[in-house]
Amino acid sequence: MAAPDHIAVERSPARNPASPGRPVAARRRAQERAKHGSLRSRFRRDWQLLLMTVPAIGLLLLFHYVPLLGNVIAFQDYSPYVGIKDSPWAGMSNFQWLMFDQSFWDATINTLSITTFQLIFYFPLPILLAILLDSVVRPRLRLFIQGIVYMPHFFSWVLVVTLFQQMFGGAGLLAQILRDHGFSGLDIMTNPDTFILLVTAETVWKDAGWGTIIFLAALAAINPHLYEAAAVDGASRWRRLWHITLPGLRPVFVLLLILRLGDALNVGFEQFFLQRDAVGRDAAEVLDTFMYWRTLLTGEWSYGAAAGLVKGVAGLILILIANKVAHRFGEQGIYKRS
């Protein structure tokens, strides 16, 4: 029997999957199904590309992530003769000794001083060199200059230090020229006061040209029509550099700066190891050489592992902080913002 017109009949709303009244759990299940369906479709589309990445992922796991398990010896009194399994547990004692070791802090201060100095006086040089190379009009001349500035990157640090010794050592070319003109000899290679200038000059000569490759690629990605439009509007070369070139390089600059800050405690081993005896431990001792002398030569494996773990964690924290600052300034950084 039909209900009278004056009696309101309550009807349930139609179950529209997209309606806002749909239960939350059902909506989540629908989103999960759509997500998994999208992943399956993307996998079917790109499985060949994913298969090509398997060897690289395998190498990354084998040589980078599996060795991370060895950091457990930082919490042990490790001995290679008994192995990790049978080495006694030491807890945080290795880190406590590290915090009160003055030689560790001296090496840390030297490392941070060298990194800060090179960030100011070395890091911008590849950008300037890339801009200069990009302004060379003749392709053959540009390739010739690029070959010259790239070449030192392939020299070993032994050869680089030897060349600088022949130029700036006590019996080097510069000292001989000064003596021939009545001045006293100059030995920069054994002067601890100028060691930071020396290692920065060596780094610039060896790697500044190689560092321009990324910035040259970034310059090539800038739309040339922007330069043409700016020239038509009467913008000078400097105005185009300031308003087009530098903003185009800014994302790459921020990315490399973040990575360099994360690597701030790792200034290299071979360069400083080769010159440590010449200038003394106080000037040339960095964290990498500190761990070598305190670990491999003395057999304090757990102590060196603790120092390496502290250095790695500090680098990770610096990367996260720098990336957060980059996000605040509107840059993408090393990963996208959520």
Image (cartoon, rainbow, N blue to C red):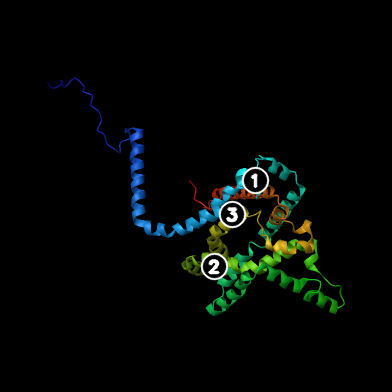
In the foreground, 276 or 75: 75
Percent x, y for residue 131? Answer: 58, 68
- Inter-mark Cα distance, 3 to 1: 28 Å
Q: Is residue 325 visible?
A: no
Above/below status of 285 relative to 317:
below
- Does the residue at mark 2 contact the one at mark 1 (Cβ under 8 Å)? no
Percent x, y for residue 132? Answer: 59, 71
Which mark, by number, is residue 216?
A: 2
Q: Is residue 274 visible?
A: yes
**Tag in front: 2 or 1:** 1
Q: Which residue is mark 1?
A: 74
Percent x, y for residue 270? Answer: 68, 63
Q: Is residue 171 left or right of residue 76?
A: right
Amino acid type at image mark 3:
Ile
- Inter-mark Cα distance, 2 to 3: 19 Å
Q: Which of the 4 image quadrants contains residue 206? A: bottom right
- Does the residue at mark 3 contact the one at mark 1 (Cβ under 8 Å)? no
Q: Which of the 4 image quadrants contains residue 75? A: top right
Q: Residue furthest left?
A: 1
In the foreground, 12 or 97: 97
- Inter-mark Cα distance, 2 to 1: 43 Å
Residue at 69% x, 67% y: name it.
202
Mark closer to the chain start, 2 or 3:
2
